[in-house]
Amino acid sequence: MDTQTQTNNQPIRQPLTPEQVSPEQAKANAAAMQEGNPTLNPGDIVNRELTLEEKAKKVAVNVADITGHPVVVPTYFVVNDPEEGQKALHHVHDAEEISDVIRQARTDENGDRTWW
């Protein structure tokens, strides 16, 4: 599993709304879906060559749901690991580990959620 960790202490920002997804990525994903008969969503492909920051910006899903509300799903979820530091977990390949992280989430005295 790819566990690239962040080397600086800058916070990782992941796109959570359609407006935060780069236009280049949106166009590239749309073009990939139009080519032939793709068997995978472009966001389902694991790319081990990307840096942690690049992985954090990748989006697997950027569409409206049946009610018209926008849905953005990151390709990689950036989490803090006490042993490895920050790492990117792929939404398909590392789904079990993502589930473990969610189960371990805690809320502090201020109501803020802390992970791992």
Image (cartoon, helix red, strand yellow):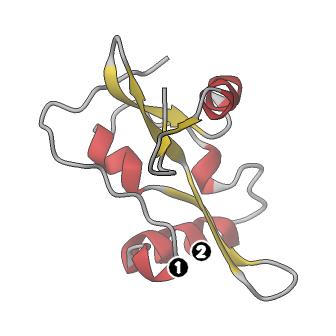
Q: What is the quadrant of residue 55 in the picture?
A: top left
Which of disc 2 and disc 1 is earlier in sequence?
1
Task: Classify 16 as above or below 51.
Answer: below
Circle 1 — which element?
helix
- View extreme (bottom): residue: 68
User: What is the three-letter code of the residue carrying label 1?
Assistant: Pro
Q: Nearer the viewer, mark 1 or mark 2?
A: 1
Tell me which residue sits at (78%, 60%) in the image.
Answer: 37
Task: Classify 24 as above or below 83.
Answer: below
Task: Classify 75 as above or below 103.
Answer: below
| Distance from the alpha carbon under mark 1 to that under mark 2 | 14 Å
| Nearest the eye: 49 or 61 | 61
- Which residue does the numbered mark 1 point to in the structure image? 18
Circle 2 — which element?
helix
Q: Position of residue 10 (x, y in %)?
A: 16, 47
- Which residue does the numbered mark 2 point to in the structure image? 30
- View extreme (front): residue: 109
- View extreme (top): residue: 83
Give the crowd class for mark 1: few <14, some 14-19, many >=20 residues within 10 Å. some
Tell me which residue sits at (51%, 51%) in the image.
Answer: 111
| Relative horizontal placement of residue 39, taking residue 60 as reference (left or right) | right
Q: Position of residue 77 (x, y in %)?
A: 51, 42
Q: Position of residue 51 (x, y in %)?
A: 28, 38
The tag on residue 50 is none
Give the crowd class for mark 2: few <14, some 14-19, many >=20 residues within 10 Å. some
Tell me which residue sits at (33%, 15%) in the image.
Answer: 84
Q: Position of residue 103 (x, y in %)?
A: 69, 29
| Relative horizontal placement of residue 81, taking residue 73 as reference (left or right) | left
Mark 1 vs 2: CB contact within 8 A: no
Give the mark count.
2
